Image (cartoon, grey):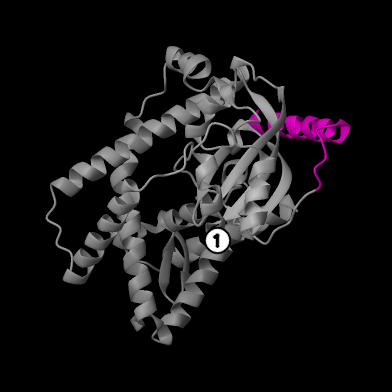
Amino acid sequence: MKKASLVRLVGVIAVLSLAACGKSAEQKAGSSQLAATVNGVELTSHQLEFVMRRSPAAAAFADNPEFILQALDKLVDDEIAAQKAISDSADKQDKFIYASDSARREILAQLAFEKLANTVGKPSADEVRTFYNDTYPQMFKDRRVYVTDEVVVGAPGLQALKADLQGSTFTIDTALKRLDSAGAEYRRELVITRPEDLPFPLLPKLSAWSNRMPLVIQAPGALRLLFLRSSEPMPIRFDDARPRIERFLMTQRWNDTRQRLTQEWRNDTKIVLAPRYEEMRAKVKEAAAATAGSPAPAEMPAAATDRPATSAQTAPATPADAGATKAIDSAIRKGIDGLK
């Protein structure tokens, strides 16, 4: 297979070399960058390299002839299809115009921030150690895995729980009683919860979490209530946690720098919204102010989840017995595999 691929590659190079022979001296100067021509349209080696870099296999197979030819075939096929679309006047359609303009804008914006990557330095050993020991010890040093009852409540059921969420004690039995009395829809299930499954603002609450009060995760039109059953310690050694912490801190720095520059650029730019969008923004601000002024349930962080509330599905109230212990052991193993 490799020998055949080499022959194919040599054949392609030979064909391209023969094609270059018919060019003028000026054209020959750039012939080494030519990869192929499609109906007279030149495709360059730079374009080919760009296609190759977009493949997940690029690092491992960058010098593999078969991989190179597959990328070249894709580049040629795309050019053929593009030429066909142009012959059908697809490049005059609004869909193409708007999509290409959007892609251009996104690429230019990405390039504007790309040079920032070199300015974001690697966190120091002290910063990593501080994160491990003090900032979020619940993620690594003091990590535990929790067996929880999760109750997902839709917006109609929130009023039934409002008073209890603002109290000091709120058990799952009380929650289910309130929801059933109100005829509210909810979903209940036994889940294994790891620190990495939770929004960062909730992590400091884990050390004081008990079965007397749930963790509350807010989502669009719903709440996730996590009632603690039991937990098992599963710390992660510093040496194992360090790469993850370094990546997190670098990403955090990058995002902070990007947000700061974006705001600076906006401040230096004259921006005028059309009247209908100015009115829309004013209404959104008014609604946000009204929401901020109303009392909110205690312990409710600004976080989101992808688990919407559904019809009532009450799970059997089994205790955290041997079955739960097996579940938590399995979750611990999976969690550590994912963290390493």
Q: Nearer the viewer, residue 251 or 26?
A: 251
- The answer to whether 207 is drawn above or below residue 188 in the figure is above
From the viewer's side, name the closer residue of 200 and 104. Answer: 200
Q: Is residue 184 something that shows in the picture?
A: no
* Residue 74 located left or right of residue 103: right
Residues shaded magenta: 316-340
Q: Nearer the viewer, residue 68 or 167?
A: 167
The location of residue 313, given as percent across then percent down, is 73, 56
Give the residue number, with chain letter if any, for mark 1. Answer: 72
**Image point (60%, 27%), residue name:** 209
Q: Residue at 69% x, 29% y: name it.
A: 145
Query: Given the current orientation, which residue lies at the most extreme front position?
Result: 181
Quarter of the picture holding the N terminus: bottom right
From this viewpoint, is residue 231 visible? yes
SS state under label 1 = helix
Report x, y in % for residue 87: 42, 86
